[in-house]
Image (spheres, rainbow, N blue to C red):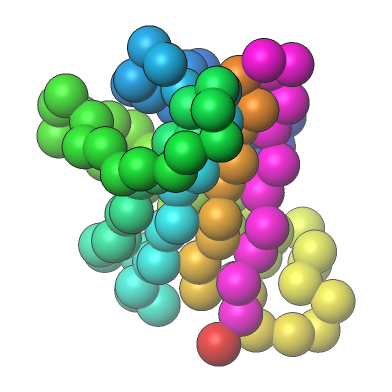
Amino acid sequence: MSEDDIYLQLGHILLDTSPAIAMKVIVEAELSPENDHCQFLFDYVDEDGKQDWFSPVSAQVDSELFDCLVELRKIYIQNGITGGCPIWSGCVITLDVAVSKLAVEFKYD
C-alpha cells in the first residue's frame, strides 16, 4: 500500500464511522514503539461548532486505523522520511467532512 493509499483509507474509515451530524472528525492516536497497540480518542465538531466525543460502532474501526498507521510509520522508516529524528509516536488526524480534506499532524516524544 502506498502512502497516498493509506491517507485515502484513513479518510474513508473516518467518513464511514463519524456521526451523521459531524462536519469535522478529529482522531488522536498514540502508537506504542513496538507497533503492537494504539490508543485512540474520537471527537467530532457539528455544524454549530460544538465539539463532542464519539465511539466508533465497531472495534474493527480501531483495528483498521491501527493497521494504516503502522503501515504509514513503516513507510516513513523505510524511505528515510524521518529527517534523522526518531519516528513519530502519535498523530492527530482531522477530516473536514464538508470539503473532504484530510490532515495529519504527527507527534513526537
Q: Is 79 placed left or right of 46 in the picture? A: right
The stretch in magenta equals: 98-108
Dominant secondary structure of the residues highlighted in magenta in the image: strand
Quarter holding the C terminus is: bottom right
Position of residue 21 measured from the top left corner of the image (x, y, whole percent): 42, 16
Position of residue 15 measured from the top left corner of the image (x, y, whole percent): 47, 18
Quadrant hosting residue 76: bottom right
What residue is rendered at 60% in x and 19% in y? Answer: 97
Above or below, comparing residue 109 to residue 100 in the picture: below
Quadrant hosting residue 56: top left
Position of residue 39 measured from the top left corner of the image (x, y, whole percent): 28, 61
Q: Is residue 50 visible?
A: yes
Q: Nearer the viewer, residue 56 or 78?
A: 56
Give yes or no for residue 103 being in the magenta stretch. Answer: yes
Q: Is 51 placed left or right of 74 in the picture? A: left
Position of residue 25 measured from the top left corner of the image (x, y, whole percent): 50, 34
Above or below, comparing residue 83 to residue 102 in the picture: below
What residue is rendered at 31% in x and 44% in y? Answer: 53
